[in-house]
Amino acid sequence: MKLDFFQSTLNSIKGNIWLEGLFGLEKENIRVDQAGNLAMTPHPEVFGNKLKHPYITTDFSESQIEMITPPLPEIGQAIGFLETIHDIVCLELQDEYLWPQSIPPILPADKQIPIAQYDEDGKEDREYREFLAQKYGPKNQLFSGIHFNFSYSEKLLELLYRKANSQVSFDEFKDEVYLKTARQMLRLRWLYVLLYGCSPVVDPSFELRCKMSPYPIDSNVIALSIRNSCYGYRNFDDLYPDYASVRSYKASIEQMVNDGKIAAPKELYSPVRPKFIHDPDHISYLEFRFIDIDPLTKAGISTEALRFLHALALHGLMTDEPDDFGPKAQHHANRYHTGVALYGLNSTPFLIDEERQNVWHKTQTIIQQIIQLFEELEINQTEYSHSLNQALQLAKKPLNRKVYEVLSGVVKDGYVPFHIKKANEYLDDSRNKSYQFHGLEDMELSTQLLLREAVKRGVLYEILDQKENFVRLRKDGNIQYVKQATKTSLDNYASILAMENKLVTKKILTEYGIRVPKGLEYASTDVAKADFLIHQGKAVVIKPNQTNFGLGITILKENKDDETYRRAIDIAFEHDNTILIEEFIAGKEFRIFVIGDEVVGILHRVPANVTGDGTKTIRELVELKNQDPLRGKGYRTPLEKIQLGEAEAMFLKQQNKDFNAVPASGEVVYLRENSNISTGGDSIDFTNDIPDSYKHIAVLAAKALNVVITGLDMIIPDASAEATDDNYAIIELNFNPAIHIHCHPFQGKNRKLNEKLMDALGY
Amino acid sequence: MKLDFFQSTLNSIKGNIWLEGLFGLEKENIRVDQAGNLAMTPHPEVFGNKLKHPYITTDFSESQIEMITPPLPEIGQAIGFLETIHDIVCLELQDEYLWPQSIPPILPADKQIPIAQYDEDGKEDREYREFLAQKYGPKNQLFSGIHFNFSYSEKLLELLYRKANSQVSFDEFKDEVYLKTARQMLRLRWLYVLLYGCSPVVDPSFELRCKMSPYPIDSNVIALSIRNSCYGYRNFDDLYPDYASVRSYKASIEQMVNDGKIAAPKELYSPVRPKFIHDPDHISYLEFRFIDIDPLTKAGISTEALRFLHALALHGLMTDEPDDFGPKAQHHANRYHTGVALYGLNSTPFLIDEERQNVWHKTQTIIQQIIQLFEELEINQTEYSHSLNQALQLAKKPLNRKVYEVLSGVVKDGYVPFHIKKANEYLDDSRNKSYQFHGLEDMELSTQLLLREAVKRGVLYEILDQKENFVRLRKDGNIQYVKQATKTSLDNYASILAMENKLVTKKILTEYGIRVPKGLEYASTDVAKADFLIHQGKAVVIKPNQTNFGLGITILKENKDDETYRRAIDIAFEHDNTILIEEFIAGKEFRIFVIGDEVVGILHRVPANVTGDGTKTIRELVELKNQDPLRGKGYRTPLEKIQLGEAEAMFLKQQNKDFNAVPASGEVVYLRENSNISTGGDSIDFTNDIPDSYKHIAVLAAKALNVVITGLDMIIPDASAEATDDNYAIIELNFNPAIHIHCHPFQGKNRKLNEKLMDALGY
């Protein structure tokens, strides 16, 4: 069946809807020791059962980790997810790295290569791997790569269907769309390999065999993409599925199995595979399998390369194709593919398969066509334009391709040391970004941390509302809706409402014998002023009922003078219709995070500050402190950079200092009065430094309000003394406490509240 | 001990803080049959165990209902609570009334008067009543009255304590305050009786005995307050407790018991009783026991009378007292009290107890003093001023006292028919106000209804935040926090958040195979317009994501024309940054209220309308319809009055009508397009008129979101047909649905959702 889209389609379906779809990635990475030898250790136990973990499993070898993202609505998110899995995995490895190259590291003898271990349920998986080792040799199985799973959005498909006025059903129409895309991608895949292929050399321990020759070949061969070449891992026979229709495709593969060429459909190593997930008779998505690991990118693939591949697929769909894609045409496409893989390092014009046009010229022409297509379709997305332009530049200046940087690195450092160095860089980056979920950086850090833990535990998640940080978790029938990480089904609504109402909270705590700042609420200036008698001589805080940034608050430590008292009341009433006069309790404020019966983290916040060394200026000290990877801007990191702004200058001025002052060695200089993290404050973990007696009170307070998850704020005048009935006060219980501040404090341990939450949620 | 407050107190403690305190009421009402005979039926079973119900029990007789309010922060609330108990009780009686008079109704012979029945736990209570019947005669026990429990606010007491510079402890100081108040009230109680006494005659079946005479007296006696006179129920002996201190008070009563004058302290029928609740050694509050039931007020006492009594107590506290309140002074006060009770019907000046001043002059002087005291204390509260002025007017024109209205009614109708007529009026009023909790009218009707049910079931409640409609319920260890009647601990927080997010709700329902309007969300005008192809030819609603009053919504029933479609999108975007294009589903919208597995109410709303009779104008029909006691203004009633405003005029104009048009008989004329209750719409109960198949879907939807309490909105095109997969749609689930609309619909049954909620909460 032939599916051509005419000018009318181009005229009527416009805009970025063309980019909508679902994008998933699978990546294999071999675990190596620090010398670059294949790791002989088992798959990390923390990731549980390989057959059940949706994101982290093994491929052929026990040491070949496979990372799988779910289908995601944006390429950036898919790569981010992949990078996040990568981070999670490599942080769990002990003295091992993830090998950042499609070509294997230093391998032992065939028999010592550990095939993936399974329990009883994985018997078939093990047997199939043993069959593959037998048939193709275990070393060949260790070629690693990236697969890209791609589907068009249903909306786009529906629009195309309406426009095509097709006689077939919508499901059949979608099959046609995917089959055309597959055929076109098979024809054009060489172009992707030409620009982004990156497996140029092998380690001497690897025995290269070309499928055309039964003998090992000199391992000094250098090529653009050995993995995609005839030396790569592939079927022994030339196999040509029939891509004309789903029925003929399935029949042709069945024939191969019947002919004994492959043991099962999955043994057909086609560079593009239609996938049947929801319905055995209709294609759900396409899998592109010819992507080399990019050693220069932690995730193994750049967004530019992947967006180019996506654009190439769209180009294929929207471009008329030759009538035929029979064995001859497929053979031709395969020769082109392997030819480019072998000879693509030539940066000068070259011909493949006696084509008259040189490859570079042809490449540039096609990319220009894609750019033009995007213009006609009114696709207007910076990332895609950037990606297409980058591809065009690479076609024009082939020496700028990454493969050359890899080659020069290998030449300089050696094959293994170069890749180990890269792996080590990525490990450092993973450590520095351990608070982050790549691709979801616009979500709250608490949610990013929770989702990291979900990925680690193999809990499926779905983002229900990204702006709202509303997600759904699911594993083994346990479905949980979670908003902002700590709003969960564990708490009942009435308790949330009680926490939300400060007066109610205080009333309940008081009934439980828990100390809260005593106080009175006033809606009338006159009544508040008349009550001077009551508050006279006591240390009080006079404040608006609702206040931001501490505006309108006066602390009267003695409250002897009626005049001052009355002014403080007027000031408070300037900010709200209701004010509170509460006893003032001096002491440090601690955030105590409770889950169920347990205090899981205690934090104290300190205003933005630097500690002098006797030589550096405040400005220099701030710049130094701001280099901490935990400090950033705009709440995307656990801590914020200290500013050198007006507020800080003013505050220093009160201390007769400026940014150029040189504090004495050990002198702590504060740049802000308030301790908010958002203005550069430090978070200091006190979880183990507060007597248990306060923790018991915190848990009792949570019980009093019948809450499971809460972050409560307690003032403790002397944290070295045990709690009595009277030497502390609880200010409030927060029903949506942040967790990231406890996971990545400025000072102290990661209290792993994301793990604790996932435990509490039953995962 | 003598406690005098000097000018300094008056100067320094100012304002309405003087009115702060706690106010409780207890009222006895005898149940009578429709002929005015003492009811011989048992106490209504619905109120459960008499010993455990905090609000509704019996006094001496099984037919003598006692209603008890908790201590409340305002006199209006206390009387409102009492009236609400009254409503609840009388609506549960079968063909019986609550007898609105302190003097008993028609009584049978002594032996037939049923003494209150108790189970095994109430053995002592029963025995004590039998002892009283023996000693005083059962008829005397049936004098009924009102007790007023009163305490000063702790804040006022603290201020007084500070000002008094007292040498004693705060607790002892408070005792002094209460004892002084008690002594002064004992001295001045005659004044209250003089103005508000209201038990002037008895039924011939009642045998009046004066304690000074062992023989029955002519029952034709007429007096101001027979109950407060020597004919009333009182101790045989003149008993004079020692009110000088708590210790002497307790010792003097113990002496009376030891002397055999009374069996226990509770047998001392003092008109003012100090009460010891929290601490046996210190007074918690005072009980004033000399209040006659006011037959002209449903609650049995008016707010004016009670506020006057409160003012009298404050006057007593703030006025210097004579040194002595020994037996002689008490005897004098008692003679004054009984004298006024017997002779107070004189409206001309009269002397009691050889006092030189006439009573009316003395009364006026004291009220003037109170008014002056309030001025000096800067108490500024309209209700109290009104109350004091009313008292002053009564003192000036004694014939305006209520007792005369009662007497003239008795003369006209007869003693029993007059009171039965009143009881009947009150029953009608109770029926008409059965949606209301008196004194809490500013709370939501849903909460008022829930609290009524709490009172009925003997569930203690506390208002935690009146503005927020946040209450706490408590019975037998089951504590529940409830906000706005339907925000409870039964629902988990995550489900609330899922309901709150329309997109999430729709996603989940769709996954459960539940039909929701299909639709797409747009944040961009261009994308929405480009999607014409998708929506073309379908009936769609184009609307802002968030909308009020239906602004910005366009319904396109055919959607053929790109131009119109584009305009509708522009209009929607004028109201929000995000718009929805949803399929349009024609049909009636129903509110389905689900609790757990059950649909407990289904309601359909109809725009404001009248039905013609061929003669009345629309204006007249509206006025007639608005007479329904369920219709009011400002959301204090289940339905709102239909307005005759601009909007209604405009809408009629579209139909070529105005307010003076006369609709044909049976013609329904709508005055509004929208069906909101707030604009005079009708609520129509459909609970039994919707096939179960829709109810099952509603319960499934609640299950899908894991919610217990929800009001979901479903569109049903044809409610006579069973539900299929496709002939309905759920619009949304509300997590805070109103209950009152199901309890008091315009048309249909009370679905008693307050009862259902209390069941669900485990009460």
Image (cartoon, coloured by chain):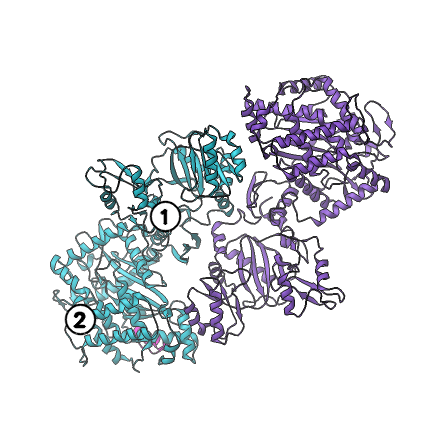
Chain colours: A cyan, B purple
Residue A170 lies left or right of residue A310; in this view the side is right
What span is in magenta?
A241-257
Q: Badge 2: few (under 14), some or many (20 or more) residues near its Cα, within 10 Å?
A: many
**Residue hosting label 1:** A754
Magenta-highlighted stretch: main secondary structure? helix
Residue B441, horizontal then vertical, whole percent: 63, 46
Q: CA–CA distance between discs 2 and 1?
A: 47 Å
Reading the image, the residue beneath label 2 is A344
At horizontal 78% and vertical 43% (from top left) the residue drawn is B422
State which quarter of the image contains the N terminus of chain A: bottom left
Q: Amino acid at mark 2?
A: Gly
| Tag 2 near tag 1, CB within 8 Å | no
Q: Is residue A402 visible?
A: yes
Residue A394 location (% of width, % of height): 20, 69
Residue B331 x, y percent position in the rendering: 75, 20
Residue type at mark 1 is: Asn
Left or right placement of residue B354 versus residue B668 in this view: right
Mark closer to the chain start, 2 or 1: 2
Side of B273 relative to A359 (left or right)? right
Where on the picture, by quarter, is residue A712?
A: top left
Determine if residue A255 is in view.
no
Q: A43 and B215: which one is in front? A: B215
Give the class, few, some or many, for how many residues have Cα within 10 Å of label 1's Cα (few <14, many ≥20).
many
**Badge 2: chain ID:** A
The answer to if A449 sits in the magenta stretch is no
Q: Quadrant of residue A248?
A: bottom left
Camera-nearest residue between B655 and A460: B655
